[in-house]
Amino acid sequence: MDSDDQSPQIKGVVIISLPPPDNPSLGKTITAFTYTEPQSQSPSLQSQPQQQNFHNNSQSSSDHDNNNGFHSNPSSSPELQFSFRKLFFGTPTKIFTFFSVLLFALFLYGSFSSNTLQELSGLRNNDDHDDGPSSFLFPLFPKIGVHGQKDLRLKVRNFVDTQKENFVVTQRKADVYPKVADSSSVFPISGNIFPDGLYYTYLQVGNPPKRYFLDVDTGSDLTWIQCDAPCRSCAKGAHVPYKPVRSNIVPSVDSICFEVQKNQRNEYQGSLQQQCDYEIQYADHSSSLGVLIRDDVHLLTTNGSKAKLNFVFGCGYDQDGSLLNTLAKTDGIMGLSRAKVSLPFQLASKGLIKNVVGHCLSKDGVGGGYMFLGDDFVPYWGMTWAPMANTDLYQAEILGMNYGYSPLSFDGNSKGGKVIFDSGSSYTYFPKVAYLDLVASLEEVSGLRLVQDESDTTLPICWQANFPIRSVKDVKNVFNTLSLRFGSKWWILWTVFQIPPEGYLIISKKGNVCLAILDGSNVHDGSTIILGDISLRGYMVVYDNVNKRIGWERAECGMPRRIRKNQNLLTDSML
């Protein structure tokens, strides 16, 4: 070989040989060749790959970690060491390519398949459920509501106190109930958007425990149940009203009473009454008035045992407004916000759970799903997360939103705004400007065999088609997906929450398709998006109060993915 050819020309070859189909036990063979062309190369290094290849062909894949041509230490071979330097530091193009592939791999990891993640999540040791706080999983049931009723259970941000007379209760002896060791509970959710209205679950309260159906509401602080104290204005309800005892009344000097009344007018704080009164006003102008009660809530665990918590809730003896309609098949509201008086906070303060709330509302026509308290059912991978704002509500900031490719504005611009996740609201509400932008974008459907039908008063905007509409699937190709972009303006990739047509359309009794996004000018502060049940269906939504973040992933909502094989959603026969 001429002297001009003496400069090292590094080459490498990797050969992967699969075992024969009739004998897969032989395993695969991985052979690596690294060689240089100069004649001065060490003979042992030249012959090594051939000998290694012959040796590897007789071994199974289980032995290849130490016998596949990579067992040699690169530092002991100048030629091999030089090859790695040449590979990674030879040209800027190779460096750019290497990091581009690395970033792409990280992106794929973040978008990892939910099915694969479900298999990986099962690797967690079941013994972990026995260490530390537990979790409770609740069912959601269907509730009969009023057709087209615009339920909005988002609580107005204060409790209003008026001087109320002491209510009269009967005295009864509280039953003794043994406290049971912590364990996970599993309860099934039911419900639908239209025509029923909301989603609800149940709690068992009192001694002996009695079951009460409660609307699942992440926008409310206080859990309350209709009660006979006596009842001044109550709906029929699903069950006989709760009957309190005098010894369970929360006194006005209790610290949790101060928490409930902290936003009330000063003239009513420090009341001389012995009981702690409350009045909650909701954004739909309905209200509940009552007194705070402390009684036991019983949570049935999956192994058949029971956990018991001394729980503070409202005894509502005077309801007004649309609540009287929504309480036709329920008994009250379950407050799941971040406030200290909420159910998850009280459970977490007792060490029973970590302060994490999650729900999964089924998107099919039957409705249903489940809700859980605690972090045992939060997926390890596959969740999309957004930072949680520092309020009692589950609120996050968004950079902007689109209908298809058309941007929707906030207050005359497209810089973004605030979003509240509210499971107590049936429909979704947009600020005035964003709502008008959306309505203008939807005018295009008029040329696609859909004509607005003003005679249909189910919702403000309904379209009639020249063909029968059985479900939203029949017209979903006419509408576009709504996209809400969360994150920071400095991020390269946004976090996106997508609302498909099924997440903002319903079919009315007249067979028309109606827009279930409403004008939110008079809701909350008028400038905030309220994501109601209609847009939360088909997602597992997690409110992680420990890490202050809100997460979501698409889900079927039939059964939690990490539920143990010996766990089942509780049915009435188990109660």
Image: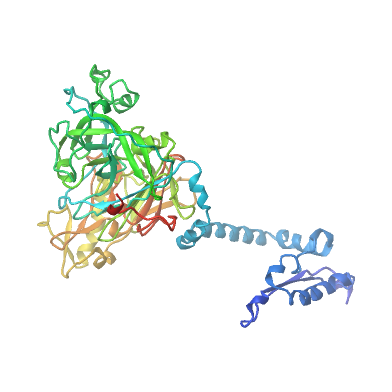
Residue at point 75%, 61% (across, down): 84
501 vs 359: above or below: below
Residue at point 46%, 55% (across, down): 382
526 vs 514: above or below: above
Q: Quadrant of residue 389?
A: top left
Query: For the N terminus, which image quadrant?
Result: bottom right
Residue at point 72%, 58% (across, down): 89
Quick one: 265 or 299, which is closer to the camera? 299
Quick one: 317 or 547, which is closer to the camera? 317
Indicate the position of residue 125 as horizontal and vertical percent values.
53, 52
Q: Residue furthest bottom?
A: 22
Q: Quadrant of residue 431?
A: top left
Q: Is residue 406 visible?
A: no
Indicate the position of residue 347 as horizontal and vertical percent values.
39, 37
Q: Quadrant of residue 298?
A: top left
Left or right of 56: which side holds 222?
left
According to the image, what is the colour scheme of the structure? rainbow
